[in-house]
Image (cartoon, rainbow, N blue to C red):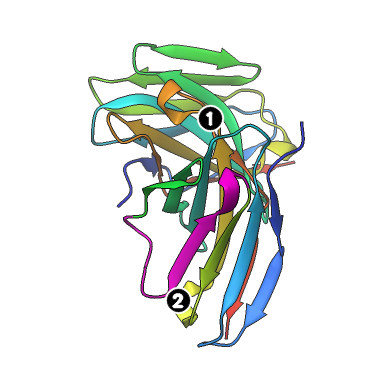
Amino acid sequence: EAGVAQSPRYKIIEKRQSVAFWCNPISGHATLYWYQQILGQGPKLLIQFQNNGVVDDSQLPKDRFSAERLKGVDSTLKIQPAKLEDSAVYLCASSLDLAQGAYQAFGPGTRLTVT
Amino acid sequence: SQQGEEDPQALSIQEGENATMNCSYKTSINNLQWYRQNSGRGLVHLILIRSNEREKHSGRLRVTLDTSKKSSSLLITASRAADTASYFCATDARGAQKLVFGQGTRLTINP
């Protein structure tokens, strides 16, 4: 079974620029998550999709962050404009059905540096 | 906000020793999960324990759950250098349908 794919692996941008991350979940996984992980901390959930609908985006800074999941498969997360405090690793994860106690499979992450 | 709090924040032991990490949480849960993260990598699921379970084993891993104390522990026996990583507990709070991760324990195994 192929794992969760993410690209790019690394990105360096200047503040006020925009950036986009891409995620391809495990085939058949209905639920997709984007997390932000700041150095030395645990992952913080930004947004959760069930198929192509948003389940939870309560911690997504909507003035600058946006995400979509096209056709319930791939997803993109965008930051526009970026701030210095957005420097972090952005992790994508997917699962079968969290309501049934499924675990989450994580991609390798995208390390973003904002200068 | 973080639901789970791991203790200790960092742990350094000799290869072959056992490592114990603890996690405390605040609300009622459906299940609690432990994940490992090697430096620069994504998280890897280790084990899931449901709220009606008290202990679970997987290879060299042993997880306990005490719902009355809202705490869990992860024991790694006969540690190896390859166990060096950060370990996170994550709770699936009742009614939330999402995982909330703690800050993690950074484990270093010295050869």
Pointer 1 residue? A103
> For this rendering, which residue is in front, A42 or A112?
A112
Q: Residue at x 36, y 48 (%)?
A: A56
Q: Earlier in the sequence, mark 1 or mark 2?
A: 2
Check disc 2 and report its element: helix, strand or loop.
Answer: helix
Cα distance, mark 1 to mark 2?
29 Å
List the single residue furthest toward the front: A71
Same chain for marks 1 and 2?
Answer: yes
Q: Residue at x 45, y 30 (%)?
A: A98
The percent coordinates of residue A20 (x first, y second) are 60, 70
Q: Residues within 10 Å of mark 1 (few under 14, many from 20)?
A: many
Q: Amino acid at mark 1?
A: Tyr
Is residue B78 shown above or below A39? above
How dense is the environment of label 2, judged by Cα within 10 Å: few (below 14), some, or many (20 and up)? few
Instruction: Determine whether B57 is above or below A19 in the image.
Output: above
Residue A17, label in figure: none
Please state the chain letter of the residue tagged with numbered disc 2 in the rendered image.
A
Q: Looking at the image, can residue B108 be seen?
A: no
Question: Can residue A55 be spotted in the picture?
Answer: yes
Give the answer, above or below, for where A95 lies relative to B66. Answer: below
Q: Chain of mark 1?
A: A
Counting the numbered discs, the total is: 2
> Which of label 1 and label 2 is nearer to you?
1
Magenta highlight on residue A71: yes
In this picture, which residue range is highlighted in magenta? A58-73
Q: Position of residue B40 (x, y in %)?
A: 67, 56
Q: Is residue B35 left or right of residue B28?
A: right
Query: Residue B79, located in which quarter of the rendered image?
Result: top right
Residue type at mark 2 is Glu
Secondary structure found at label 1: loop
Instruction: Indicate which disc residue A85 carries.
Output: 2
Q: Quadrant of the N terminus of chain A?
A: top right
